[in-house]
Image: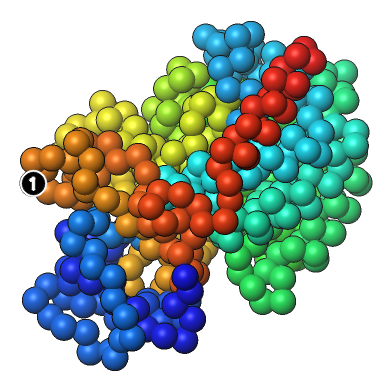
């Protein structure tokens, strides 16, 4: 159902998380693709409305926004050879699997990962694709096609690797590309897909896999290309101490110093993980207003460490939430990721500082700030109509007093209804146009095929 030119009142929710402390206790009015009114507790709408939905059994939230993922990794969840390994050995094993990816695999992995995110309450998906074996040079084109069939927003990154094992890198040479090929294709994808005809449903960013998987020249040229086209920059950084040590051996400096030398220390950049920074580096990151994609489940599964989210925020960084790839998280559920953040971050900062509201803000307004989308991630007049409705009918919510806290701590799993750009995309916990069982069966078949190739 589209709200089109008619006004819809999402009426009297059981609770409303706005991400900005505004009062929308009696719901919101949606018209076309935007929120046009917040209705405070005890108030009636001032905007004429054509219909309403009784939301008294729902917690209403801005749509969640995922800032870091590797969709293709849904094909390699819990692969025996990668289980119980830290980052570098885990990567070296899985690269031997991922080098066999093909077009059909990328299409179905993109759809399945995005669908997982969507039914968990996500309205904007983000992906970091950097594996381009021969025959898969058009991987991002395939991803755009897969995403458009789901009617969701996406920030897709043109990832890259140009240093293979023969040049001291981690990936096999069969999945890397030349600097020239990467830069040419980056420009092609920006021209073809980034905000096509002014439509902001698909955005393109540029994302070398990591500073030690591409050449120094490619890092520098990618930053120049991003500035020229006004697009964002993304990479992995400071995920493990092994990575820091690798960078010291390779370049003689720490990763953040290298990043700055390459022209990346600015507010165009967001970094995946951001765990192992010194206090002085945290201050520098904050002054540059760099974004951080906080990935708690992945960081725990690979025993990488705990992101210093509060320190980074206090310094001036934009902090958002991400599930990371499904080979280092094994699930793509954003509302569950908020719970993981709450539990993990309390180990570092305590129960009083890390609240349900804080981690939900990471998943909404914080993530939107990373993508520089100030029209997303909050319930506010003029914001895009990207809304998640979580049912409180489940056994897990029975007896809950504070329903926003319950959404996180009691473990919400699925959005019952999800609106993206003013259109209902999820109804009764299912996508309105995608056959989930058919997609799951095909995806599982392709995963088995890929894993047999090792």
Q: Position of residue 100 (x, y in %)?
A: 81, 25
Q: Position of residue 365 (x, y in %)?
A: 38, 58
Between 150 and 372, the one lying in front of the other is 150
For the C terminus, the image quarter is: top right
Q: Is residue 153 above or below residue 339?
A: below
Residue 334 image-quadrant placement: top left
Give the structural element (helix, strand or loop) at label 1: loop
Q: Is residue 436 above or below residue 329?
A: below
Residue 58 image-quadrant placement: bottom left
Residue 227 image-quadrant placement: bottom right
Q: Is residue 208 above or below residue 90?
A: below
Q: Position of residue 257 (x, y in %)?
A: 61, 37
Q: Is residue 211 above or below residue 417?
A: above
Give neighbour class at mark 1: few <14, some 14-19, many 20+ (Cα, 10 Å): few
The colour scheme of the drawn protein is: rainbow
Residue found at x 69% / y 45%: 207
Count the labels in the image. Answer: 1
Residue found at x 27% / y 30%: 343
Q: Position of residue 344 (x, y in %)?
A: 31, 29
Residue 264 visible: no
Between 444 and 74, the one lying in front of the other is 444
Apparent side of residue 350 relative to residue 182 in the rendered image (left or right):
left
Name the residue tied to disc 1.
Answer: 401
Between 386 and 382, the one lying in front of the other is 386
Apparent side of residue 383 relative to residue 84 in the rendered image (left or right):
left
Residue 45 visible: yes
Residue found at x 41% / y 82%: 31
Residue found at x 62% / y 39%: 438
């Amino acid at each position: 159902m589209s709200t089109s030119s008619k006004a819809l009142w999402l009426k009297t929710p059981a609770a409303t998380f706005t991400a900005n402390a505004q009062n929308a206790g009696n719901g919101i009015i949606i018209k076309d693709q935007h929120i046009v009114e917040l209705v405070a507790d005890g108030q009636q709408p001032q905007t004429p409305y054509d219909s309403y939905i009784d939301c008294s059994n729902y917690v209403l939230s801005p749509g969640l926004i995922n800032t870091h993922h590797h969709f293709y990794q849904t094909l390699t969840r819990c692969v025996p050879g990668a289980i119980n390994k830290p980052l570098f050995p885990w990567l070296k094993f899985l690269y031997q699997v991922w080098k066999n990816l093909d077009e059909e695999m990328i299409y179905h992995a993109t759809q399945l990962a995005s669908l997982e995110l969507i039914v968990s309450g996500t309205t904007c998906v983000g992906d970091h694709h950097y594996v381009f074996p021969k025959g898969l040079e058009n991987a991002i084109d395939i991803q755009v096609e897969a995403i458009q069939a789901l009617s969701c927003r996406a920030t897709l990154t043109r990832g890259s690797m140009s240093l293979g094992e023969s040049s001291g890198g981690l990936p096999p040479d069969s999945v890397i590309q030349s600097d020239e090929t990467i830069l040419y294709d980056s420009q092609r994808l920006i021209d073809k897909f980034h905000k096509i005809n002014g439509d902001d449903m698909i955005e393109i960013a540029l994302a070398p896999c990591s500073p030690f998987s591409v050449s120094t020249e490619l890092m520098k040229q990618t930053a120049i290309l991003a500035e020229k086209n006004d697009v964002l920059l993304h990479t992995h950084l400071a995920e493990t101490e092994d990575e820091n040590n690798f960078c010291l051996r390779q370049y003689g400096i720490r990763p953040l110093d290298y990043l700055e030398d390459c022209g990346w220390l600015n507010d165009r950049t967001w970094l995946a993980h951001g765990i192992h920074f010194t206090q002085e580096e945290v201050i520098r990151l904050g002054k540059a207003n760099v974004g951080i994609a906080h990935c708690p489940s992945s960081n725990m599964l690979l025993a990488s460490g705990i992101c210093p989210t509060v320190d980074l925020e206090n310094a001036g960084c934009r902090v958002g939430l991400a599930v990371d790839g499904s080979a280092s998280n094994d699930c793509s559920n954003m509302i569950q990721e908020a719970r993981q953040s709450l539990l993990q971050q309390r180990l570092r900062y305590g129960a009083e500082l890390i609240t349900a509201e804080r981690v939900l803000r990471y998943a909404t307004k914080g993530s939107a700030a990373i993508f520089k989308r100030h029209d997303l991630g909050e319930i506010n007049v003029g914001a895009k109509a990207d809304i998640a409705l979580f049912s409180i009918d489940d056994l897990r919510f029975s007896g809950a007093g504070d329903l926003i806290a319950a959404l996180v701590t009691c473990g919400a799993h699925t959005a019952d209804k999800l609106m993206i750009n003013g259109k209902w995309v999820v109804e009764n916990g299912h996508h309105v146009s995608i056959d989930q069982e058919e997609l799951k069966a095909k995806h599982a078949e392709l995963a088995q095929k890929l894993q047999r190739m090792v």
